[in-house]
Every structure is written in structure tokens, then in C-alpha cells.
Image (cartoon, rainbow, N blue to C red):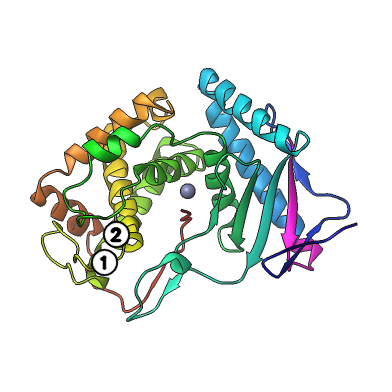
Amino acid sequence: MFSLCHRGYHLQPCDPPLRIHAPPLPVVHFLFANCPYEKERVAAVGKAGLFLKRAVARLATFPAWLTEASQRAVELSYLSGGKLWAVAFLTAQRRILYEGQTPAARHTNGGFWPTDSPLIFVLRRERFGEVFVHEMLHLLGVGVGFSDLAIKERPLCLAKGSVFRPQEAWVELQANLCLLPSGKQAKKKAMERLRTYVASRCRILLQAWGGQSGLCSLPTGSVHQDSDLFSYFFVRLALLLRLESSQQWDDAELLEPTTGATAWTALALKDLSSPTARVHAVLETEGEQHSWPASLAFTPPLSI
Ligand SMILES: [Zn+2]
């Protein structure tokens, strides 16, 4: 047995080691920090395994894409003796933003993937499985190839100087699609719930920054991360609206990692290019839920 120390946390391999395997990906090993309860560790890994299998099943419907993702994972695993690693902190901290607080990373980040590494980090107990899949999709190469889009299709509603990273919204959309329930009606309902939630986050962020009307600009004083967070939700909303109107949940273009994804996202953003369309998308999509809550919880998965 050994223990590692990372930023004051003690990371311990499980005994027996917990790992999951979803062929054709390499085995994923888990390290846990500050989680003495075996039952909790086993449950977390079980959920991650189940969700990863569902993600691989979706990727497998597009064989070329799965092959590319698999090769990428295998190459990265060479850095670590043929293994992938998931470092799980399982903190109890939830993504709750209280009245008067400025939205920031601590309200949103669920995990991260250090670029080009064979490991991912999952920070919270909250939505462990969903965040695990989101970070694994980063590792597998989802969301690459958005650099041109970032310049050409930057939404007009973002403040000057804000960071626009549409790949984050794209990766989250893919994670959502991997975990949709089966059955057309159940999928439709799940997407409606998701879209309503994302629209409410857009509205609440605008409220937090004082940009209540028009949805055309954010206060210029917003820090980059805040603006980035709004763009994340705004692009997600555009993607969900386009997906709902097309109802092509399983369109191969939705998984194509470069040009298809970029073109698809650009079309989604064009749908919301007029101020009227943006107001409608954000305000009207919530139906009857027009009251602005004093606090909000970022409960669905959200990882940057
Ligand atoms: Zn991410």
C-alpha cells in the first residue's frame, strides 16, 4: 500500500483495487481522497462504470469515432503503464450560489482533465457519474477543433474580452446525450427539462451581473471567468434548442469530432443571432417559471 499527498489530500488506492473496463478503452483505476467508506467508493465506481459503458455504447454507433477515441486513450495510457486514472475527491461541497455572491469556479467546477494526460479529476460527490463521463469525453477527444469557431461565431451577447470556449458546451451536450433515457418520449422529456434548466441558468447569471434586459451584452466589468460561464450556458442553450427542433438525437454529425461539430454549433448559434431570438430563447423557454430565485443550485453536471 502507498499513499500520495496532493495539495494536502491523502490519496489512497483501494484494497482490492477498484477499476472499471469498458472495451475497447484501457482499464480505468481509481484513487480516492478523504473517503474512508468502502461502500461509498464502491458505489461511486459502480456508477462511473455504468455511465462509461453507456458512453461507449453511444460512441460505438459511430465506429470510426470510437476507433479514434480508443486509439487516443491507449496512447495516453502509455504514459502510465497502460492504465487510465480517475482521482476522486468526493467532497460534500455542492454547487450552490447564495444571494449576493458572484458566480465563480467554486460554484461550477465538477472536475477537470489535465490536457494530454492519462488521468482525470472528479472533485465532488454531487453528480459523480455525470462529471466522470464529461471528463472522460475530454480525454477521449470530444470537443477538439473549435478554434476557428471561437473567432468566427462568437455570440454577439458576450462582453468584449470574455473567453468563448464552445467546446465545453459541446462536451457537456455529448455527456447529456450519452446518458439520456431510452425511448423517444422519455428522451424528449429529459431534453425539455435540461433546456429549461439551462435557460434558467442564463437568466440567473444575467441577473447576477445586472444585465437583465436585451441579452445583448454583459457588464464590461465582468471577469473573464464569469463571462465564460455565461457563454457556456448560452451555447448549451443554443445547442439544445437546435437539437430539440431537429430531434436528431443520434445524428452522426453530433459526434464527429471536428468539422461536423463545429458546423453544427455554428448553425445553433446563428439561430440565436438576433436579440429577439435570444430573449425568446432565455425568457420564454422557461414557461411559467418566471420568478427569479434568491439562491440557485448548480445541480446538473457542470465541469470546466
Ligand atoms: Zn469540461
Are the residues flagged by discs 1 and 2 in contact, CB closer than 8 Å? yes
To which residue does mark 1 refer?
A: 222
Q: Earlier in the sequence, mark 1 or mark 2?
A: 1
Asked if disc 2 is less than 8 Å from ligand 1, the answer is no
Can I make out residue 180 in this image?
Answer: no
To which residue does mark 2 refer?
A: 227
Figure check: 78 above or below 197:
above
| Amino acid type shown at disc 1 | Ser
Local crowd at mark 1 within 10 Å, few (<14), some, or many (≥20)? some
Which of the pair 8/298 is nearer the observer? 8
Secondary element under disc 2, as helix, strand or loop, is: helix
| Amino acid type shown at disc 2 | Ser
Q: Residue at x 58, y 21 (%)?
A: 67
Q: Residue at x 14, y 55 (%)?
A: 279
Magenta stretch in the rendered image:
27-40
Q: Residue at x 34, y 36 (%)?
A: 147
Which of the pair 43/34 is nearer the observer? 34
Q: Residue reaching furthest top?
A: 64
Asked if disc 1 is less than 8 Å from ligand 1, the answer is no
